[in-house]
Amino acid sequence: MTRRSGDVPAQLVRDRYPALLARARMLVRDPVAAQDLVRDALVATATGRSRPTSVPAAEHAVRRSLVTRLLDGQRERAAGERLAAQRAPDAADPSPTPAGTTGPADEVEAALATLEPRERVCVVLRHLDGLSVGEVGEVLGLSEGLVRRSTADGVRTLCALLDVRTTDPDRERADGAVHPAGATPTVVTEGARDLTDVLRAAEAQRAASSEGEPTVVAAASRALAAVRTARARRRVLVVAGAAAAVAVVVTGAVLWSQRGTPPSAAPEPGGAQVPGLSPLRQAEESDLRGAPDGSALALWVQPASDATPTPAAGAASTVARLLLVRPDGDVLDVGPAPEGMQMLTAWDRAAGTAEFWAEGSFGEATVVDLVSGQVVGTTPDSVDWAGDPSPDGAARAWTSDADLHVERDGVEVRYDLPATACWMVGWSDDTHVLVDCPRLDEATLRPAGLGATTLLMDTTTGAITDHRSVEAGEPSPAYPAHRLADGRLVASLAVRPDPTGEAPRTCPQRLVTLTGLDTAPFAEVPSDLLAVLPGVAPVPAGLLVSGTTNCEGTAGSAALWAVDGETGEVTDVLPSVETFDPTQAGLQSWVVGD
């Protein structure tokens, strides 16, 4: 049976995660940094516009992403202090095994860790993957001369540390015989092993030892969850993008307002209970199929209380329900959520159906009829991310790895970015985009430590026309930006992750309007972290925003707010529920209807 492309990332993680982690350990010795590197490479591959449709193709793409992301330097800095004590052994020590190692794989990884990142990557691509000098240069964006020098320097160091000889992959004979690389002879013990064989054996040993290991299994699960979340965000943004296009042309939209007099209709017995809100009216078919523009559908887990009936034996301990959030601030109870619903991904207002991912599923969405509550089918995860449209609709743009892609008049052009961890924030105008990158050197525009640099790029030429940097710990405009009905561009301010990978939380979350690289205050949301997909979505009257509310140290679920597009006034829509486990109470996910 042919496997749908949407299942490829899940199958890749199930079948090949130990092998991918072993490759990452050859590039980054620190186990945690290696797991992060694999996770980020998986997410980049699974959410790119050209998604591989087979496991071998996906694995190839992930392996290439591993090396390009390493050279950005972020992971190297994250592991720098932990590797400091494991650098090359003292020259007086005759042992070829660096201190602190316990086996062949540890020995090889420790030796590789002494190399500069570029040397390490070149050695891996040349001797493990068998790429030619020209192919390595194409993958890494380096000249052939620099590839040769980096490979030679790395090989010389490894031969000395591991007591191995080396062969030049480009000089293998057709009969299988090999010749020592002649450019830089290395004196080694007679009968020394071949470097390529040693590297491959170490990688295979690391992969075999990782099979079934609890920490590796847990890391694989986290990686798959990260892929799933990223793809859900992309899927939700496709819907949100359509809503944004509608928002620009809609006039006379209903503005968000404080909730008025509670409806006279009696709530359904045992229906949804939202703390701080009057009992919710049961939504009728006309409410669901005729919901006004800017309505949202929310997955809500009923918080336990003294009034909550004790579940029967074998029943779930929490009750999940769907809520209809209207632009006038009214919240209606749609009814119980289908069993196993974990994340909403789309809502077709006209058809009265919603799509969601069920717990444990991957690669397809389940479709439920909101009126009957019945599951009516599934849809493959086939939404293609076509990039963000320009304000005039004449072009689309998106980023992947170290490239900015621009499609105009059916022709796609790709421009180099100065680092791999760059994300497009949004279109500044019809021809320029804003791109968020790691901090870059002011003169060379190459990675230069912690912090962030925002680029203004011309999509017709690829030129960086302006840039602005902030120091580590300072916020900068973050992806994705959204365009309001009046055409203004709004983005949240966020601080890039520190060397440990943790993103600092700031209270409150600030939203700003963007004019080129200039920012102006727009709104402040009482949240420490914008969370629960989609986080931010445009509606005709402004924005809907969700996030956690731990600013005062009280653990709780996410809340939902409406931000008026004209005034920036923030209105509570769904409250945070105090809980130590946000998955057991309160807002779980939401989506704006299309």
Image: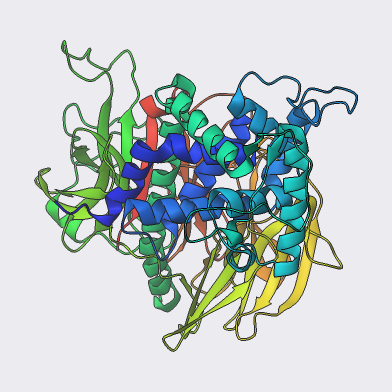
**Number of residue marks:** 0
Q: Is residue 455 left or right of residue 576?
A: right
Q: Position of residue 432 (x, y in %)?
A: 63, 79
Q: Position of residue 199 (x, y in %)?
A: 58, 39
Looking at the image, which residue is at 39% across and 23% down? Answer: 212
Q: Position of residue 310 (x, y in %)?
A: 22, 12
Apparent side of residue 217 relative to residue 280 in the rendered image (left or right): right
Is 97 in front, or is 402?
97
Q: Nearer the viewer, residue 495 or 73?
A: 73
Identify the image quadrant of residue 146: bottom right
Residue drawn at (52%, 30%) of the image: 206
In this view, 562 is above or below 555? below
Q: Looking at the image, can residue 24 be seen?
A: yes
Compared with 342, 380 (above or below) is below
Q: Split into 4 quadrants, where in the image is the C terminus?
A: bottom left
33 left or right, relative to 260: right
Position in image of residue 381 (x %, y %)? 28, 55
Residue furthest to the bottom in view is 409
User: Residue at position x 74%, y 33% from top?
Assistant: 189
The colour scheme of the drawn protein is: rainbow
Q: Residue furthest right?
A: 92
Between residue 553 and residue 112, name the one nearer to us.
Answer: 112
| As drawn, 181 above or below 555 | below
Q: Residue at x 32, y 30 (%)?
A: 301
Q: Is residue 527 visible?
A: no
